[in-house]
Image (spheres, helix red, strand yellow):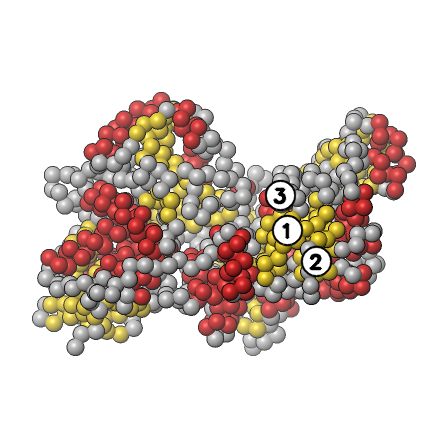
Amino acid sequence: MSIKDRYDVIVIGSGPGGLAAAISAKKNGAKDVLIIERDVEPGGILLQCIHNGFGVEIFKKDLPGPSYAQHFINEAFSTGVEFLLDTMVLQITPEKRITASSKRHGFVEVRTKAIVLAMGCRERTRAQIRLPGTRAAGIFTAGTAQRWVNVEGYMPGKNFVILGSGDIGMIMARRLTFEGAHVERVLEVMPYLSGLTRNYVQCLLDFDIQLQLQRTIKNIIGKKRVEAIESVAVDKKWNPIPGTEEIIPCDTLLLSVGLIPENELSRQIGVMIDPITGGPIVDDSFQTNIPGIFSAGNVVHVYDLVDWVTEAGLTAGKSAARWVSSGSQTNAINLPVRAGENVRYAVPHTIQPDHLAEGDIRVQMRVRQPIEKPVWVEVRSGEKLLHRKGEPYARPGEMVTIPIKQKLMDEVKSAKDLTIAIVER
Amino acid sequence: MIDFDVIIIGGGVIGCMTARALSRYQLKVLLIEKESDIGMGASSANSAIIHAGHDPLPGSLKAEMNIKANPMWDQLSADLGIPFKRTGAYIVAIGDEDCECLDSLLQRGRENGVACEIISAEEMRNREPLINPQVSGALFTPTAGMVDPFAACIAPLENAIENGVQVKLETAFLSFLTKDGSLTGIHTNQGDFNCHWVINAAGVYSDEILRQADPESTFTIIPRKGEYYILDKSEIQLNNILFPVPSAVSKGILVLGSTHGNVLVGPNSTIEEDREDKAVTAKGLNEIWLGAQKLVPTLQPGSIIAVFAGLRASGNAPCPDCSIDYKHDFLIEACTQLKGLINLAGIESPGLTASPAIAERVIEILQQEGLKMDLKENWNPIRKARPRFHHLSMAEQKQLLKKDPRYGRVICRCEMVTEGEIIAEIHAPLPARTYDAIKRRTWLGTGRCLGSFDMPRVIELLADETCQPVTSITKKGPGSEFLFRLTKKVEA
């Protein structure tokens, strides 16, 4: 395959966000679109997610990860998106020159008019949660274990304890059980689940795997390989409660303690990062502070459903194609979207009210504290309530979405900012 | 028939530097190491500083070796390809009380013959903008520097190997072999080896070996644990070495840059009975975080990417100069009870700095003890560092990639380590055979994802290159295997 010198849009990463962005850029008029992917195959982390649960929103079908990815891989190929696989981006300059290296393609230098950053996210490690104990073999992130079991075909342990009730952790609890391993239990430091309720039901409850809330790990024991962990109950401020320690023998500890958007490249180019999400500050077209650089998917903020990642990619790709064809920066004023009462963050960070002419703008957020009662999700302009939507509950593990309705365009145009809040009904 | 003239017990920085010093001579030398790789003890868990020598008690062996060794590092790092930066170091006073201590530190530094000067609070703030604004002054020692501590072990030993020294890993000393009271060899878990001379460089176990030869000796190692944090270089950059004003027992909790770019924070100092216990503790980690924030208050817990601990081989050797009342000196001497044994014990900080001078001292002692030492005619002092793709210029990267396309595939994305680099380490003069061995040589897996991404790929490469099943690949030697079995092959 020959690589051109110049592209209209280059997408970095071929997970669901990157695939959607490339397809959408192509469909919206970008002529030459290239995806650069570091792995040998396109699809990103979906390839190791062989469980079902993908595509319910978009396809109204319950697909395994690789099938979901394949749909978009096929579409990318048929629309003429080019791929540069097994290639790592080393550097991006402000002039949008990209250098990359590859065992297959050697040293690659390309120029592009627009970029979509779609590098996804990585898993939080033991160091980031300051987990005490030895550095024995047998301490893995849940995603690494998932790669071993589902892609490489090897078992990284026999007796597991899982710290964190994130989705990957719960899904791995079930997966390991299928493969004949024993999952002793799942520990969660918070008083509530951090992943989706459906995963708790389908992966833990259905397999009699115990979930212990408000417990964490006090010590990891074992010099060469993990031999046991010492768990301890914590109070509301995460302080260990003396006397509640329990030694749990196991040979493997899996960590499912959160995901971090992977933005080292973004930072290098000068993209502004939101300290709460860990991802770029974006407008409703998913453009960053640097004109012509867009970003989409888990690199912006961590989603709980792949369908939303695809949607974001479609928007970012379309915006990138338009940016290329208009050839200039729009001078529209961006209206800030602020996280108000009980909202940890909201994405996008700003909206261009003019974009409402084309349809509703979707705002997505994470709630700060769980509310196990019916709630209102509100959009306010100052004190004034512009729009609200009811939800049966609000949980930190489940992303909340509210559209800014097209019909509100006039009110939004006259607003100074918008504030999103989640309150009890 | 002898197997070896000299056997070195222990592949820490002291053993490795000694092996290289001995490789200059026409001697048959063996280094044995009980672990699966060298440098797995204190040599791989320390502050990675080449100390100026302002701190050790004047007249002590620690001071003598530190001061003699410090200037050796320029030549040594150039010859052996060890990353080394002579950055200078600051002992930073926070508040008025600390400031009063600076004068006595300056005095001690001058007594040791170390270049040092006191700088103002304002100057300190200029030189390190991240410093606590409450700074009241600092002592600057320009000859201090930072070194890659792993390379400080691997490079000299590789050079020694290329000059004829043999190395046996996973070989543990068990006892001395003697005949009529004289040393004839050593007994190990891998069999017996005859020799005339033994160098005890066994770190935290050096006292046990010493006492096998001299049961009456009162020398004891009481390991002191030191815990550390590593911070993400993409979140905090700091190119200086910052010490607090020292306490009676240690140099305190430092904040420093590294040759590798990441900021290092630590260590604390706690007595540890178990000589293998390198676990980090919640208490210790809190302690070093609080200590570090005294120097750099803006440190963010979110930028922590790794935690580790090491054990200092703290001994109770008196200073050889009897007029000096000091009970924690290095012990570097020929054993009086067993002719042929040279003990290098109680080598804690500044042991890494002092290692090349200690190695020279071993040569002197062996000569004094009567070993005939003739120089080799064809000794090669040079060991070239293998290429690090990420550190090359773009032109060099292109060239390397053309020569060997494997350098184009990035395996560790945080530290940008390529397949070519990993394979080169697997087939190096001292072959890397475990995941951690590759980690220490390339720094892969030391970044923000802690190896989550590279680990499956590295294990596969290790298995492929050494023709072993992946289930036999370990993190750090037998018993630390990563994988148990294929999926579907459920055990009965």
Amino acid type at image mark 2: Lys
Which quarter of the figure has residue B10?
bottom left
Categorize mark 2 by other alpha carbons within 10 Å: few (<14), some (14-19), many (20+): few
Is B243 placed left or right of A142 in the picture? left
Q: Residue B21 carries which label?
A: none
Find disc 2 in the rendering and name its residue: A4
Q: Residue at x 23, y 55 (%)?
A: B359
Relative depth, front residue between B357 and B13:
B357
Q: Residue at x 43, y 42 (%)?
A: B257
Q: Distance between the residues labelled 3 and 2?
A: 23 Å
Q: Is residue B206 above or below residue B196?
A: above
Which chain does the numbered disc 3 sit on?
A
Earlier sequence position, callout 3 versus callout 2: 2
In percent of width and height, residue B483 lies at 52, 68
Which quarter of the figure has residue B180?
bottom left
Which chain does the numbered disc 1 sit on?
A
Relative depth, front residue between B311 and B239:
B239
Q: Which of marks 2 and 1 is in front?
A: 2
Label count reads 3
Q: Residue A98 carries which label?
A: 1
In percent of width and height, residue B287 lies at 42, 39
Q: What element carries label 2?
A: loop
